[in-house]
Amino acid sequence: MKDYHINIFYSDEDGEYIADIPDLNPCSASGSTPEEALSEVLIAKELWLEVAHEEGLPIPEPMYRPAIYQLRA
């Protein structure tokens, strides 16, 4: 089963971790730990999808994949 990719990163500006789902723009959340940010963005995802469904808005298929670079030794 495909699911939406989630980015989690630390934001110096915000002083906490940010989690976002690029396919569901805008869908993001924050927390004091990566785990907390993940938990919050999963709640935000469910709410995003619920509202889109209720409003008859298109729900995008999971497509986003981060660029992965191989480091050379």
Image (tube, rainbow, N blue to C red):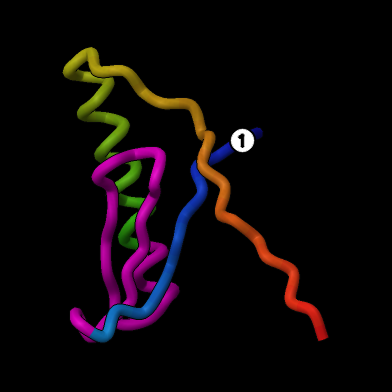
Image location (x, y in percent) of residue 33: 37, 81
* Quarter of the figure with residue 68: bottom right
* Quarter of the figure with residue 3: top right
Disc 1 target residue: 2
Residue shown at the point (28%, 41%) measured from the top left: 25
Secondary structure beneath dot 1 equals loop
Residue type of the residue flagged with mark 1: Lys
Q: Quadrant of the N terminus?
A: top right
Residue shown at the point (19%, 79%) measured from the top left: 14
* Quarter of the figure with residue 32: bottom left
35 to 48, vertically: above or below: below
Image location (x, y in percent) of residue 11: 29, 79
Residue shown at the point (31%, 61%) measured from the top left: 40
Q: Nearer the viewer, residue 70 or 40?
A: 70
73 to 58, vertically: above or below: below
65 left or right of 11 in image: right
Which range is magenta?
13-39
Q: Residues within 10 Å of mark 1 (few under 14, many from 20)?
A: few
